[in-house]
């Protein structure tokens, strides 16, 4: 199977395997404030993301590129939606285009459609600092994501089996690049132990990429004869991963993995995140309902965030971290067993 076919399979199976509620946001209850003491107009959703300098707390997370005409059109659509709404956008892994320059078009289109927007490049942790610099130059990236995808590789018959040296390469990339580096998981979550190792490098942000949304074990299992079903429910649920990463990583913490609504985003902020990325939910809006609907949904997300901030009496996103929340069920148990009280 060619790389282009694999990319189109990923899009198709990401849509058909869908998103559950395994990210555990439903175990969090926010505490309403009947006397919030502020108005809607007082709220600001400008996030505090340090060097990353995002203008909106919502961004389009890495999905496509390098898969022929289908992914070029999808990337162009996502780029126009990002431009129209002023949110940041990450492209899918650029390794395909580093290995085969004929694949560059589906990435370069993103910069052409959105010349002044905040664009994030993307490579896997097998990349070298030289490749990272090339990926940044390819799209004039404002930041670079390095993705960690052990489970996807293990479930791919043709995938990698050796994950040594990733931390050292990440540290090297962060030292060599002059744009901020984000390390992201791809749906299985960043644990406290992983976040602590990353805290020792010069990266600017951790994107927790938690369990509960797009599930690459399910997607890859659709493509294999002998299923590795034990990876279906594997991973740190997003809500827990935010708490774990926040407890040891001093830089920016990005929430992602199964985020489907503004309420999931607000809860991510209450748990300690600084901004939130959506991949599967935006893909579904774009493919099922088109560019106009995606733009509308991004605007609604931003408006809904401000609605809920008003009802919580919080003017700034960063202040949400001090808002009370009641945690129950499996998330409560999980956090208690991991030593968070
Ligand atoms: C992805 N994701 C991804 N991540 C990455 O770092 N590089 C990539 O090339 C891709 N490719 C990709 C393709 C498709 C079709 C999807 C749906 C997703 C992973 C993505 O950025 C994100 O981490 C996970 O999908 C979890 O977030 P959601 O989808 O639950 O919001």
Image (tube, grey):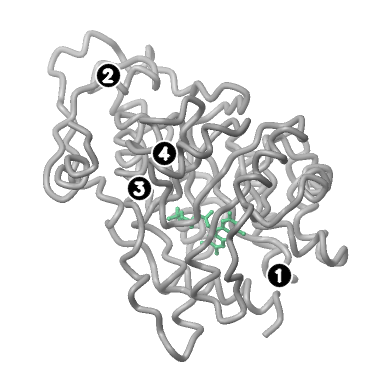
Check mark 3 vs ligand 1: CB closer than 8 Å? yes or no.
yes
Quadrant of the rendered image containing residue 105: bottom right
Residue visible at 40% across and 51% down?
Answer: 210
Mark 1 neighbour class, 10 Å CA radius: few under 14, some 14 to 19, many 20 or more:
some
Q: Position of residue 48 (x, y in %)?
A: 50, 21
Q: Nearer the viewer, mark 1 or mark 2?
A: 2
Q: Nearer the viewer, mark 2 or mark 4?
A: 2
- From what the image shows, is residue 263 above or below residue 15? above
Q: Nearer the viewer, mark 1 or mark 3?
A: 3
Mark 4 neighbour class, 10 Å CA radius: few under 14, some 14 to 19, many 20 or more:
some
Q: Say what secondary structure mark 1 lies in.
A: loop
Asked whether disc 1 touches disc 2, contact meaning CB atoms under 8 Å apart, the reply is: no
- Find the distance from the CA under tag 1 to the CA under tag 2: 44 Å
Q: Nearer the viewer, mark 4 or mark 1?
A: 1
Residue visible at 65% across and 44% down?
Answer: 170
**Mark 2 or mark 4: which comes first in sequence?**
4
The residue singled out by tag 3 in the image is 238
Q: Position of residue 37 (x, y in %)?
A: 22, 8
Q: Residue furthest right?
A: 101
Quadrant of the rendered image containing residue 193: top left
**Mark 3 or mark 4: which comes first in sequence?**
3
The residue singled out by tag 2 in the image is 322
The residue singled out by tag 4 in the image is 300
Residue visible at 36% across and 44% down?
Answer: 241
């Amino acid at each position: 199977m060619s790389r282009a076919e694999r990319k189109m399979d990923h899009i198709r199976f990401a849509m058909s395997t869908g998103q559950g509620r395994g990210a555990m946001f439903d175990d969090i209850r926010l505490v309403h404030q009947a006397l919030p003491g502020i108005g809607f107009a007082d709220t600001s959703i400008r996030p505090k993301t340090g060097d990353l300098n995002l203008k909106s707390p919502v961004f389009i997370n890495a999905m496509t590129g390098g898969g022929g005409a289908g992914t070029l059109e999808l990337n162009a659509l996502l780029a126009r939606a990002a431009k129209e709404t002023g949110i940041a956008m990450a492209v899918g892994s650029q390794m395909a285009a580093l290995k085969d320059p004929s694949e560059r078009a589906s990435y370069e289109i993103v910069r052409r459609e959105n010349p002044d927007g905040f664009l994030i490049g993307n490579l896997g942790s097998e990349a070298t600092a030289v490749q990272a610099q090339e990926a940044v130059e390819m799209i004039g990236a404002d930041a670079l994501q390095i993705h960690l995808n052990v489970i996807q590789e293990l479930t791919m018959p043709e995938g990698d089996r050796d994950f040594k040296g990733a931390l050292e390469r990440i540290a090297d990339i962060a030292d060599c690049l002059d744009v901020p580096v984000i390390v992201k998981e791809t749906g299985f979550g960043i644990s406290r132990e992983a976040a602590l190792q990353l805290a020792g490098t010069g990266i600017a942000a951790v994107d927790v990429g938690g369990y509960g949304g797009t599930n690459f074990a399910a997607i890859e299992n659709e493509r294999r004869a002998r299923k590795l079903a034990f990876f279906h429910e594997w991973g740190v649920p997003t809500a827990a991963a935010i708490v774990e990463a926040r407890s040891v990583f001093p830089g920016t913490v990005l929430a992602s993995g199964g985020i489907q609504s503004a309420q999931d985003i607000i809860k991510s902020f209450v748990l300690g995140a600084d901004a939130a990325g959506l991949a599967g939910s935006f893909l579904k809006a774009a493919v099922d309902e088109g560019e106009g609907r995606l733009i509308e949904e991004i605007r609604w997300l931003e408006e809904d965030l401000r609605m809920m901030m008003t009802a919580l009496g919080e003017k700034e996103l960063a202040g949400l971290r001090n808002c009370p929340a009641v945690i129950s069920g499996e998330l409560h148990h999980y956090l208690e067993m991991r030593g968070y009280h």
